[in-house]
Amino acid sequence: MSDLSLTLCSLTGILAIALIIFLFKRKQQRLNLPPGKMGWPFLGETIGYLKPHSAITVGEFMEKHIARNGKIYKSKLFGEPAIVSADAGLNRFILQNEGKLFECSYPRSIGGILGKWSMLVLVGDMHRDMRIISLNFLSHPRLRTHLLKDVEKHTLLVLSSWKENCIFSAQDEAKKFTFNFMANHIMSMDPGNVETEQLKEEYVTFMKGVVSAPINLPGFAYGKALKSRSTILKFIEGKMEERIKKVTEGNESLEEDDLLNRVCKHSNLSTEQILDLILSLLFAGHETSSVAIALAIYFLPGCPRAIEQLREEHSEIARAKKQAGEVELTWDDYKRMEFTHCVVNETLRLGNVVRFLHRKAIKDVRYKGYDIPCGWKVLPVIAAVHLDPSLFDQPQHFNPWRWLQNSSSNRGGSSAGCPSTSTSTASMGNNFMPFGGGPRLCAGSELAKMEMAVFIHHLVLNYHWELADTDEPFAYPFVDFPKGLPIRIQRRRFT
Ligand code: HEM
Ligand SMILES: *[C@@H]1O[C@H](CO)[C@@H](O)[C@H](O)[C@H]1NC(C)=O
Ligand SMILES: *[C@@H]1O[C@H](CO)[C@@H](O)[C@H](O)[C@H]1NC(C)=O
Ligand SMILES: *[C@@H]1O[C@H](CO)[C@@H](O)[C@H](O)[C@H]1NC(C)=O
Ligand SMILES: *[C@@H]1O[C@H](CO)[C@@H](O)[C@H](O)[C@H]1NC(C)=O
């Protein structure tokens, strides 16, 4: 081989590379990417994007980027080029085209901690199978019969332990309620029992790791959480073995109607799959709705008219039950909580328990003249839509009356500091997606709303409460009260 052919070889190589770069550049130029800067190499703008901010705002980063670029912009986040969307239409478009143009795509570290069989990271058929199991477990008929009764039982258990004139963390109490309920329904664990308490503690550590996971900096939280994960899995596995032992001993009549039994008996999931499913349902089902309840406890004292109207609604229900000689709340009672449903929606809209979702484009997509290249990360920011002043009148105001179906019965006077609004409820509903949407719509949305309503029912009937210290919800991006939302309560008698 001569030097010449070697030179020729490298020359063609260089030419080929030049051609590729040229074509790539041309393609990029032809693409009409949304405006925005990519920031630093690797990290991009991730740190700015995740900077903690008041949960009832979109944060400084979003504000500045939207002001500069509009509601759709590009950036580099979580190590990848990304399109960020604060646009209601694009968000709906992304969620509705799940599996066709976009796909769920959480950072690898989230998969590491929730498990590779967690519903949050699965796509395709496997996701569908797991989703069907969860939906059956949380189905409407079960909600009416089993779940409502137990939600009430666990609410009363927590509320009855509250002591007058001491200060305690409302957030912890809400967590206690949702955790006890979920652990009971998933694995028939009893509240207050030693192993339930241990599992709850383990979940706190686990949660901290999930929160830190998106950046996965070499901190302790993520590593500790991985350890927690294996402790929790071992625990669930122990529960599974207990069940299997019972079945082989022929003691079927003793079996509980919980999720663990259903998946063990009626599905062909592997042990590993069952463990991840149970772990992530326990997680999805208690971290979110407890924050939502804490948010309601936080927002309501700022709007005394709303508490008053809630008390009217719930006293009415309680009186009717007393007359009928009923004790437990029924489905009809729940359906009668009209104003409460407005409070629930307003709490979810303003508090934004889940701020944004992780997706990626699986095809080249064009939307409103912008190109979204295949493979790019896509982040629908649902919180930004809920706080968009062009879609919700005075979005920073807690105003449950904006949800009243019937504007003629609008009773929230502006005089009460909770101004009424003229935005139509139909268009609000369209832009309101606290539970995501499309084929991955939250499987527990109906349960979560019921938990909030039932908790509010007994809270407003039995207690007066006030915030004992200044505290406010922050988006870390996971919503949390830095001081745990300390409150002080007083018992009240209702007639
Ligand atoms: C206020 C409380 C809650 C909020 C704000 C909430 C929000 C969400 C959101 C936004 C998603 C979609 C994630 C995505 O598309 O990437 C989701 C999914 C999910 N949620 Fe919830 N959630 C709540 C309560 C619950 C409860 C109580 C459960 C019950 C166990 C639950 C179970 C699930 C499950 C299983 C999924 C995955 C659905 C799928 O991938 O098909 N959630 N949730
Ligand atoms: C079922 O469980 C009960 C109580 O634990 C026990 O007394 C009984 O012998 C068991 N029956 C069978 C068939 O194992
Ligand atoms: C479970 O069984 C069904 C058929 O009953 C089959 O299609 C599916 O692939 C199985 N799933 C797993 C995870 O083995
Ligand atoms: C609350 O929001 C849901 C959409 O998630 C909507 O269907 C429902 O009508 C709203 N409730 C009220 C009282 O406006
Ligand atoms: C709407 O308001 C009118 C008048 O206040 C009332 O008669 C009607 O029952 C209301 N409808 C609903 C669905 O609330």
Image (cartoon, rainbow, N blue to C red):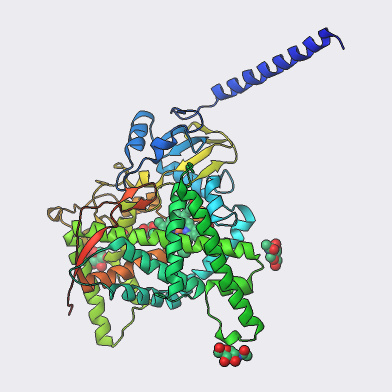
Residue 286 screen position, x and y as percent: 42, 63
Can residue 2 be seen here? The reply is: yes
Image point (51%, 73%), residue name: 187
Residue furthest out toward the top: 4
Can residue 442 be seen here? The reply is: no
Q: In the picture, residue 48 is in which quadrant?
A: top left
| Between 218 and 304, the one nearer to me in the picture | 218
Drawn side of residue 5 relative to residue 312, left or right: right
Residue 428 screen position, x and y as percent: 34, 51
Q: Which image quadrant: the N terminus?
A: top right
| Relative to 224, residue 388 above or below | above
Drawn side of residue 300 relative to residue 141, left or right: left
Drawn side of residue 455 relative to residue 204, left or right: left
Image point (24%, 46%), residue name: 394
| Between 156 and 272, the one nearer to me in the picture | 272
Q: In the picture, residue 449 is in which quadrant?
A: bottom left
Image point (82%, 8%), residue name: 3
| Relative to 69, residue 411 above or below | below
Residue 481 screen position, x and y as percent: 31, 53
Split into quadrants, the picture shows ligand 2 in the one at bottom right
Image point (71%, 18%), residue name: 16
| Relative to 488, residue 77 above or below | above
Residue furthest out toward the right: 1
Q: Which image quadrant: the C terminus?
A: bottom left
